[in-house]
Image (spheres, rainbow, N blue to C red):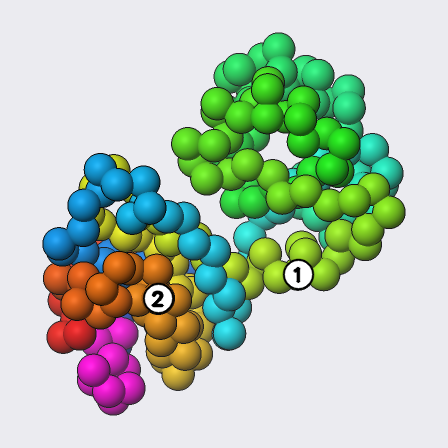
Amino acid sequence: MNDNELNNILKEARDKSKKRNFTQSIDLAINTKQIDLKKPQNKFTEEIQLPKGRGKDIKIAVIGDSLVVKSKNIADGLINEKTLTRLEKDKKELKKTINKYEYFIAEAPFMLRIGKSLGRFMAPKGKMPKPLPQQADPTPLITRLKNTTRASLKNNSAIHCTIGAESMKNEDLIANFNAVMQAIEKKLPAGKNNIKSVYIKTTMGKPIKIKY
């Protein structure tokens, strides 16, 4: 598909989507074929850098002690030792917290504890924290994650991910689309030959098929 065709499809996706009181995401649904998902090596969760960003703010939480202090003005959520203990005891609050943030970063010494107490809730959603040393500057990782999308192929043949927001220029969404498709093709055993169909849509809109 060339950029002009994709530009027309993005316009159609916007036109067919009702106006909402929030900025909708532009999402992809990629249906795969001829992949044996019973084989663990064919399953993956890939975090893909979007060259033009997500188009809206992505919430990131930091877990730890000194790393939390350093993240005070740059992270969206700060989970110190006291808050972590509370989350370990309150499963309802824990689930709300996991859903609230897109990514988690944790001070390295906390990772073993988090894995034992929270791992069974975070891992299935692909939200296990990314470890950082206590002395590290969290700013570069937070900045990178805010421009990252997550694509997973696990228990069914479809991959869903976001490539940006409806407020973004089409040329920027196209750049993100190309980056996502290239990254996913590299993860599939037979590359492009494992892709059955691709659809694009706004968060609440109808999917439109892309000739890919």
Image point 71% across, 35% down: which residue?
63
Which image quarter: residue 134?
top right
Residue 129, x across and y down, in percent: 60, 39
Q: How many numbered marks appear? A: 2
Residue 60 visible, this orientation: yes
Residue 25, x across and y down, in percent: 38, 59
Whether residue 116 sits left or right of residue 25 in the image: it is: right
Residue 35 badge? none
Task: Indicate yes or no whether the magenta region holds residue 8.
Answer: yes
Q: Nearer the viewer, residue 133 or 51?
A: 133
Q: Earlier in the sequence, mark 1 or mark 2?
A: 1
Residue 191, x across and y down, in percent: 25, 67
The magenta stretch spans which residues?
A: 1-10
Image quarter in which the C terminus is found: bottom left
Residue 48, x across and y down, in percent: 46, 62
Image quarter in which the N terminus is found: bottom left
Residue 186 badge? 2
Q: Amino acid at mark 1?
A: Thr
Whether residue 33 sits left or right of residue 73 in the image: it is: left
Q: Residue furthest top?
A: 89
Q: Is residue 28 above or below residue 73?
A: below
Q: Amino acid at mark 2?
A: Lys
Residue, disc 1: 143
The CA distance from mark 1 to mark 2 is: 25 Å
Image point 40% across, 73% down: which residue?
179
Q: Is residue 189 above or below residue 97?
A: below
- Determine whether the residue tagged by mark 1 lies in a helix, strand or loop: helix
Image point 51% across, 17% down: which residue?
92
Bin the neighbour count of mark 1 within 10 Å (Cα to Cα): few under 14, some 14-19, many 20 and up. Answer: some
